[in-house]
């Protein structure tokens, strides 16, 4: 009887120990699960913080890129970028708190929505600026082509003016000079004897020119004897830095038609030898010839 009681007590003790062991195992299992869940929650909170900071950094970079393009929205972009930077600082300082991070995630979402709206406006402005740049480049090309064309026209006009100026100059042709003996009757007899001559007759032709200006044309005639003496009036005049001593001048009424000009230079005691005759249009030599008296 006593042995039976002793066995029953032992069984009860063993049962109590088993129940205590099972309770301890369950407590340890629950504690382990809670610890793992807490560690997971902490890890998730830390990851979320990093994700928010990463997302905010991308927002800031998008504003930096837009600002580097010098858009007309710079002030507004700078203001929004500053909000992003401030939120990044707040997130960095916060503890790994789920409620705080949830609030910051919502704030980020609001900033992201604003960012998308602003970036759309930036793209529109970029497209407009590109179009304006293209139009400006086209205008520059047109202006440059016009400038070059005007240069060509100016050059052509200058060449044409030179051509007209050159073409409008009168040609003096057939310059001839001969000595004559003038008799008392007025009759003139040509001679090549210096001792007999008392008159030199100078003649030349002004050619027809339809583009030359009509009106009075004055020519300076220079006759030089064999001893290099200028005969006649011996008047000296200047044309710029040039001076000219001439024998006489002749003025012709020119009407764009061929004109024959003849002038007499009277003298005495003409020298033997070669004489030179020069015709000047102001300071420019336009014709020359020579003749000889024996």
Image (cartoon, grey):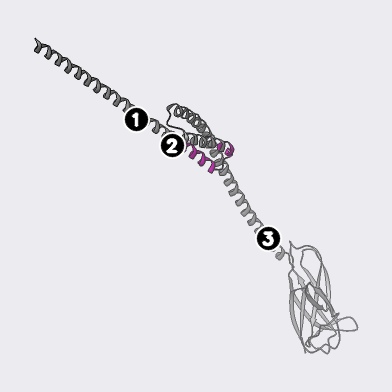
For the residue carrying disc 3, how many other residues have a C-alpha within 10 Å: few (<14), some (14-19), or many (20+)? few
- At mark 2, the secondary structure is helix
Q: Which residue matches tag 3?
A: 158
Identify whether 268 is placed above or below 63.
below
The part of the image, by quadrant, that contains residue 135 is top right
The image position of residue 290, as x and y in percent, is 74, 82
Which region of the structure is painted magenta?
Answer: 52-77
The image position of residue 131, as x and y in percent, is 55, 40
Alpha carbons under labels 1 and 3: distance apart: 93 Å
Name the foreground residue: 242 vs 161.
Answer: 242
First-in-chain label (3 vs 2): 2
Q: Nearer the viewer, mark 2 or mark 1?
A: 1
At a point 75% along the width and 83% down the height, the residue shown is 291
The part of the image, by quadrant, that contains residue 52 is top left
Q: Which residue matches tag 1?
A: 39
Are the two marked residues, 3 and 2, in contact with CB atoms closer than 8 angstroms?
no
């Amino acid at each position: 009887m006593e042995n039976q009681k002793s066995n029953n007590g032992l069984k009860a003790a063993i049962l109590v120990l088993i129940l205590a062991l099972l309770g301890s195992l369950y407590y340890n299992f629950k504690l382990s699960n809670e610890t793992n869940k807490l560690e997971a929650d902490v890890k998730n909170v830390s990851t979320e913080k990093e994700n928010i900071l990463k997302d905010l950094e991308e927002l800031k970079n998008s504003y930096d890129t837009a600002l580097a393009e010098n858009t007309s929205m710079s002030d507004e972009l700078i203001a929004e970028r500053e909000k992003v930077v401030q939120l990044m600082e707040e997130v960095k300082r916060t503890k790994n708190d789920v409620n705080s991070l949830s609030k910051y995630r919502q704030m980020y979402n609001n900033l992201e929505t604003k960012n998308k709206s602003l970036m759309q406006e930036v793209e529109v402005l970029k497209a407009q600026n590109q179009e304006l740049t293209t139009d400006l480049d086209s205008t520059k090309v047109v202006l440059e082509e016009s400038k070059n064309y005007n240069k060509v026209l100016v050059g052509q006009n200058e060449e044409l003016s030179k051509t007209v100026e050159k073409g409008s100059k009168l040609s003096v042709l057939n310059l001839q000079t001969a000595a004559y003996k003038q008799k008392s009757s007025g009759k003139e007899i040509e001679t090549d004897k210096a001792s007999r001559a008392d008159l030199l007759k100078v003649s030349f032709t002004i050619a027809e020119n339809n583009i030359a200006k009509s009106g009075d044309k004055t020519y300076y005639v220079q006759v030089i004897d064999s001893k290099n003496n200028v005969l006649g009036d011996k008047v000296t005049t200047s044309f710029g830095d040039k001076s000219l001593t001439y024998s006489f001048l002749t003025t012709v009424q020119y009407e764009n038609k061929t004109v024959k000009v003849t002038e007499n230079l009277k003298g005495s005691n003409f020298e033997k030898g070669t004489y030179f005759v020069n015709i000047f249009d102001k300071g420019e030599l336009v014709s020359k010839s020579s003749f000889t008296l024996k």
